[in-house]
Image: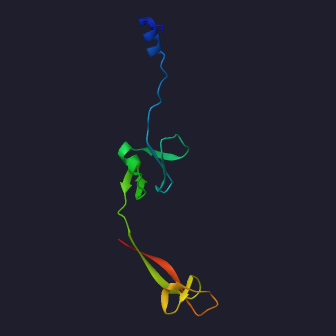
Amino acid sequence: MTQMTEEEFWAALHNLPVVAPIFYRLYYNDDGSPIIYSMEELPGNYIEVDQQTYVLSAFNVRVVDSKLVYIKPVITVKKLQPNLVTGITCAPQDVCVIVDPDQPHVKWNIVNNEFN
């Protein structure tokens, strides 16, 4: 095994490849809504974000005047609601029992109700 000389060591150290800088970006639409968080250089509108924001990757945000603005989350309540046209056909006596559409039935859909 041959040993490296001091000159070879310093030459190897000075010839290390240049490491590209790390950046975190949020790409967004023209209306400010987020598209994707990325560490890549992609086409489109973006703002630089810090590492913590990148890791969280929140989508309840908007970009306004090149600044990240968090939007208060909306509370969504899901509820079963009968529907005459579309939905899952269930027994009239029990919504838990799915029946063939040719049998007497009630159609049910899941509806989202949003509150602030």
Q: Position of residue 104 (x, y in %)?
A: 59, 93
Whether residue 79 is situated above or below residue 43 in the rendered picture: below
Give the residue drawn at x 62%, y 87%: 101
Whether residue 48 is situated above or below residue 77 in the rendered picture: above
Is residue 55 something one can see in this rendering?
yes
Whether residue 108 is situated above or below residue 76 in the rendered picture: below
Q: Position of residue 30 (x, y in %)?
A: 51, 54
Number of numbered markers: 0
Q: Is residue 83 left or right of residue 79?
A: right
Task: Please name whichever residue, 49 or 92, is drawn nearer the observer in this view of the structure.
Answer: 92
Q: Quadrant of residue 83?
A: bottom right
Is residue 50 something one can see in this rendering?
no
Q: Residue furthest right?
A: 102
Give the residue drawn at x 48%, y 7%: 2
Task: Please name whichever residue, 111 or 67, is drawn nearer the observer in this view of the structure.
Answer: 111
Task: Please name whichever residue, 46 or 111, is drawn nearer the observer in this view of the structure.
Answer: 111
Q: Position of residue 54 (x, y in %)?
A: 41, 47
Q: Position of residue 87 (x, y in %)?
A: 56, 82
Q: Residue furthest front?
A: 1
